[in-house]
């Protein structure tokens, strides 16, 4: 059986009390902190400033899983690598340089993730599978937390797994957006490797019980 890992998105946590929020995550059974970076161009919102990223690095004892929702990932990649990145994912969309970005992530010693929007076809990105460690399937439109999970993701996971297996690559599948304990079981069963969950965990006073409920 595949061990599915949990990555907690802190997009909607209380940034006035960031040390305490991250301590709660450190004390939980999750595997990563998912850090959503937004530039106000690829998506309308902006997150996070340099000071916040430094605090996340300082307080976290978990591995950091950076998700770049930005137009020009190059500079951000270097910044994330300097701030303890285990995984850095760049979007396929609106990026003519995605291949080079993936290579530079690997050269910086991090795991390279390719993120794709719900409307992007798997067959369109399979040519990049040889350069990636992680395929990040968005299960909501990128840009904000607290949205509803898109059921079309289930079929996309199946198609992705089949293609990855047929091509014989070692690529993990990460799912991001709208994940709660109602959909997590099916995502586990379909063979997802990493589940990102934000608002479902953050709105629960006891982070660890919410995380545990995703695994039940
Ligand atoms: C959406 C972000 C997600 C999001 C997850 O653009 O990439 O990581 O914050 O949060 P929930 O679980 O609330 O959808
Ligand atoms: Zn994300």
Image: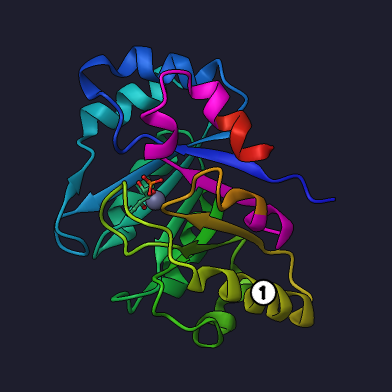
Does 211 sit above or below residue 37? Answer: above
Frontmost residue, 192 versus 180: 180
Inspect this view and state whether residue 62 appears. Answer: no
Instruction: State left or right for residue 79 relative to residue 114.
Output: left
Q: Residue at x 56, y 53 (%)?
A: 183
Q: How many marks?
A: 1
Magenta region:
186-210
Magenta stretch holds residue 197? yes
Q: Which residue does the numbered mark 1 point to in the structure image?
A: 158
Frontmost residue, 3 versus 147: 147
Instruction: State left or right for residue 180 relative to residue 158.
Output: left
Does 137 sit above or below residue 143? Answer: below
Instruction: State left or right for residue 3 relative to residue 152.
Output: right
Frontmost residue, 173 versus 189: 189
Inspect this view and state whether residue 149 appears. Answer: yes
Does 37 sit above or below residue 82? Answer: below
The spot of residue 24 in percent (x, y) is 46, 16
Q: Residue at x 25, y 28 (%)?
A: 52
Q: Residue at x 47, y 59 (%)?
A: 104
Q: Quadrant of the C terminus?
A: top right
The spot of residue 61 in percent (x, y) is 53, 20
Does 139 sit above or below residue 122? Answer: above
């Amino acid at each position: 059986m595949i061990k599915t890992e949990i990555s907690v998105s802190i997009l909607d946590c209380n940034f006035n009390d960031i040390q305490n929020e991250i301590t709660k995550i450190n004390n939980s059974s999750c595997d990563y902190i998912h850090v959503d970076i937004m530039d106000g161009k690829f998506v309308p919102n902006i997150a996070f400033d340099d000071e916040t990223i430094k605090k996340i690095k300082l307080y976290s004892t978990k591995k950091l899983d950076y998700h770049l929702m930005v137009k020009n990932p190059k500079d951000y990649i270097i910044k994330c690598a300097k701030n303890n990145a285990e995984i850095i994912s760049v979007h396929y969309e609106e990026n003519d340089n995605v291949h080079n970005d993936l290579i530079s992530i690997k050269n910086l010693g991090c795991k390279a993730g390719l993120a794709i929007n719900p409307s992007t076809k798997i067959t369109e990105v399979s040519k990049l599978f040889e350069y990636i460690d992680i395929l990040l399937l968005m299960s909501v439109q990128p840009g904000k937390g607290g949205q509803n999970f898109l059921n079309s993701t289930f079929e996309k996971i199946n198609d992705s797994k089949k293609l990855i297996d047929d091509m014989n690559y070692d690529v993990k599948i990460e799912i991001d957006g709208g994940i709660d304990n109602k959909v997590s079981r099916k995502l586990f069963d379909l063979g997802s490797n990493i589940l990102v969950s934000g608002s479902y965990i953050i709105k629960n006073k006891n982070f660890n019980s919410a995380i545990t409920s995703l695994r039940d």
